């Protein structure tokens, strides 16, 4: 029987390995950089009320959310594209610029989804190793971006899973060195947690660089990972193209409502984020006191450079009731979750050094 041929670039895609899921109680899930808090006040009730319309289609495009985001970021609605999580919207951004025989450049190790999203376009994936201290190597990225055929560069600030943020001066040098027909996608999934004063400010940079787009998400600081809403900001010509390839009706009514409401609850969101930042600092200093030397954490997670021990360390954490995210032979990422889970994690880490 003849087999349906699958595109070679799709057959070669790496699998997305998600953080472990909790089974049973008394397990702290510090494996997916989620918020340890429930949705912001009032959000669950509003979503529950909207369920009566489940028999109806949502709007084709989530115009209320687009309008709210444009207002919030002081941009035009035409500069905002919303999708089913920023993973989807990052994929769309690559799809509109890259295809077979092009190149897509990204730092590595970085976000699990980048090689998959790059691979789907059919373009060649060009991973660029991180520099010392788990930092994104902007010079090396610029060199890779300058190679003819490069259509897009992904930059993650702060970098998942290692933690440090890209600095504004490095970013400006990178943009100056990069051809202006290369789309630069700055992924700011964790921007709300950044305390580094030198960190790049993506949205302010949009005015200077027509080839820049910035991706944001409601999954982390706003605690809506389960509702799948992310967005992209940039020049309307790129945004228009991204909208054209977005699956119609891909943002459910409940998700749009939750996002619009959450965006309006800045003070409540900041309060939680500040608590996470304080706990992150507690973890960082506790780890250093134990003898570890983690890279500077600027997201809601920390990185331990465990190399060959990564899987066995993650197993030890699991036995203590804590799920972390091991990257075999590289390291372990631990999310800043519930205090109790964090303390159990620190106990395991203390026995390891
Ligand atoms: C978690 C994360 C996202 C967000 O993904 P969603 O699809 O919006 O949930 C995007 N980029 C990075 C680097 C992340 O770690």
Image: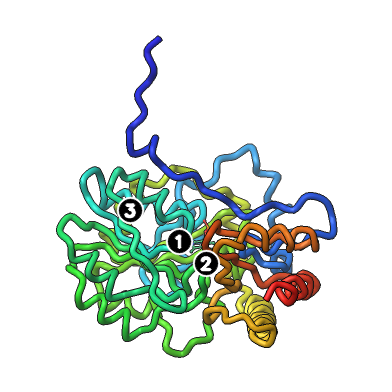
Q: Is residue 267 visible?
A: no
The residue positioned 67% from the left and 76% from the top of the image is: 353
**Is label 1 in a helix, a strand or a loop?**
strand
The residue positioned 28% from the left and 47% from the top of the image is: 123
User: Where is residue 298 shown, x and y percent of the image?
Assistant: 53, 79
User: Where is residue 55 shown, x and y percent of the image?
Assistant: 64, 37
Q: Is residue 254 above or below residue 289?
A: above
Q: Which residue is label 1 attached to?
A: 231
Q: Is residue 164 above or below residue 329?
A: below
Q: Is mark 2 within 8 Å of ligand 1?
A: yes
The residue positioned 42% from the left and 67% from the top of the image is: 187
Q: Which mark is residue 161?
A: 2
Q: Earlier in the sequence, mark 2 or mark 1?
A: 2
Q: Which residue is label 3 attached to?
A: 94
Q: Quadrant of residue 44?
A: bottom right
Query: Mark 2: few, some, or many residues within 10 Å (few <14, many ≥20)?
Result: many
The residue positioned 64% from the left and 75% from the top of the image is: 269
């Amino acid at each position: 029987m003849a087999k349906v041929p699958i595109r070679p670039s799709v057959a070669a895609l790496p699998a997305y390995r998600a953080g472990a899921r909790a089974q049973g109680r008394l397990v702290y899930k510090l494996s997916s950089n989620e918020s340890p808090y429930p949705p912001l006040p009032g959000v669950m009730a509003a979503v529950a009320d909207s369920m009566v319309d489940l028999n109806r289609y949502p709007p084709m495009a989530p115009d209320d959310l687009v309008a709210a985001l444009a207002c919030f970021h002081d941009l035009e609605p035409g500069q905002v594209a919303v999708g089913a999580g920023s993973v989807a919207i990052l994929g769309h951004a690559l799809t509109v610029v890259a295809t077979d025989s092009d190149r897509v450049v990204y730092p590595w190790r970085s976000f699990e989804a980048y090689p998959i999203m790059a691979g789907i376009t059919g373009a060649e994936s060009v991973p660029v190793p991180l520099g010392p201290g788990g930092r994104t190597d902007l010079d090396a990225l610029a060199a890779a971006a300058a190679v003819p055929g490069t259509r897009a560069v992904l930059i993650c600030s702060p970098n998942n899973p290692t933690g440090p943020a890209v600095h504004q001066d490095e970013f400006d040098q990178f943009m100056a060195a990069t051809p202006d027909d290369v789309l630069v996608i700055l992924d700011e999934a964790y921007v709300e947690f950044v305390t580094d004063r030198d960190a790049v400010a993506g949205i302010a940079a949009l005015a200077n660089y027509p080839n820049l787009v910035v991706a944001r998400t409601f999954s982390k600081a706003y605690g809506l990972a389960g509702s799948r809403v992310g967005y992209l900001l940039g020049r309307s010509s790129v945004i228009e193209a991204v909208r054209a390839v977005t699956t119609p009706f891909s943002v459910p009514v409940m998700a749009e409502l939750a996002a619009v409401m959450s965006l309006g609850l800045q003070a409540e969101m900041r309060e939680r984020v500040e608590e996470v930042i304080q706990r992150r600092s507690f973890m960082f200093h506790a780890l250093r006191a134990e003898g570890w030397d983690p890279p500077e954490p600027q997201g809601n997670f920390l990185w331990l450079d465990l190399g060959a021990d990564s899987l066995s360390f993650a197993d030890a954490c699991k036995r203590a009731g804590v799920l972390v995210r091991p990257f075999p032979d590289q390291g372990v990422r631990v999310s800043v979750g519930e205090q109790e889970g964090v303390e159990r994690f620190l106990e395991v880490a203390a026995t390891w050094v």
